[in-house]
Image (spheres, rainbow, N blue to C red):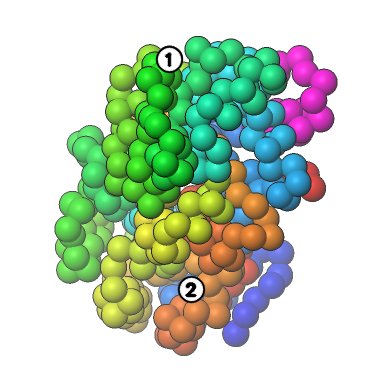
Amino acid sequence: MSKVATNNPIEVKLLAALSSLPSDWVVMAETQSNVAVDTTIAAIHMLTAKKNLCIIVSANRPYANLVAQYKNAGIDPKYIFIIDCVTRKNGGKALKASNAVFVDNSSALTNILIQINECTRTMKGKKVLLIDSVTTLLVYNKPDVLARFVHSTLTHIRSKGVNGFLVCLSDETDKEVKAEISQLCDKVITSAE
Amino acid sequence: MTSKDTSSLKRAIEAHKDGAVLMVEHPASTYIDSTILAVKTLTDAGYEGVYISYQRPYKNISDRFKAEGIAVDSIAFIDAATALADQKNEKNPKCICLASDADIDDLVRAVYTSFEKLDGKGKFVYMDSLSTITLYKPLSEVVRFSEFMVRIVRKHEIHYAVFGVAEDFAQKNFVKNIALRVDEVLQGGNG
């Protein structure tokens, strides 16, 4: 990935980590909970600044909240598509949005995968799938089921030439699941890096 | 026996010139890099082999190998990953793509079919990840496949059978069960 001018130290770290990877990279960002949101936003800012289309599986925050966050961070919404796993689960109404779909909840893995497939099929341009976060998905799914979902998703995006960016909390994620998912990635970026 | 020297696989190859069954424990965070080093060590030593990929589609893993200077012409691939993700397989003479419902017998057949593509005298079979295969296959079947790998080495059909596994799974019972059958357990990461 070529460089983008940025002053954000997290973005600088992420850019440095991605610069040594092959073009079809899939990475996992292992982060502390107190900087998880900043890391995710920095990643999206960096990727969209490079005109990557970000397909975001959000298990942490609803669409409306994310859109406000991204606006504050100066992220261009035309490069964002959100698969929202939160709004409907919390009884909220699925909004009419051209850049979002609303699935029932974070356990609806088959539906999430269908939506990812649809995005990779229909969206034109360089794409990155961002999962925020593996740790939260693990709260709602059995470890082996989630590991199979991630394996299947990463195989799918690799076969379509889509990059992957997985976020997980370093201390709060089941060690075996983290190990299984880590080994499927091209690089694990830690917040200490 | 567990070896931790800086080029453990290279040393193991030299120590077991008549063949061996090996398990390489890779750090999960650098698994692909460590795997590439291991395969490069085997091909640089003049061996040709079959690479069984449960983790990645054929094109992705072969591109990674090429980028690291591995002679992919000396490797026949078995892609078990693509069909498991319900993706379509693209036909390629260097790769056998397993169906999503393929069982261990189909995998064994694919290994034998792959041997026909190899010209060299020294052969290896490399299984990319013991833990990933167990996401889809019962442990009993994985152990049965390990027995097949051991058998083809003992019968001198190949020189080296290599199982890759993440370090974090080394203490799992099924991994320890397979580790008991191998000649040496190596630490990956340094080739």
Q: Which residue is mark 2?
A: B22
Tell me which residue sits at (36%, 64%) in the image: B135
Q: Is residue B96 magenta?
A: no
Calculate the distance from the C-alpha at mark 1 to the C-alpha at mark 2.
Answer: 44 Å
Marker disc for residue B85: none
Q: Amino acid at mark 2?
A: Leu
Question: Mark 2 and mark 1 in contact (Cβ < 8 Å)?
Answer: no
Which sits in the foreground, A14 or B113? A14
Tell me which residue sits at (27%, 51%) in the image: B84
Q: Amino acid at mark 1?
A: Gly
Mark 1 neighbour class, 10 Å CA radius: few under 14, some 14 to 19, many 20 or more: few
Q: Position of residue A77 (x, y in %)?
A: 54, 15
The answer to whether residue A121 is visible is yes
Which sits in the foreground, B37 or A27? A27
- Magenta segment: A3-20
The chain to which mark 1 is attached is: A
Which sits in the foreground, B56 or B172? B172
Marker disc for residue A125: 1
Q: Position of residue B61 (x, y in %)?
A: 43, 43
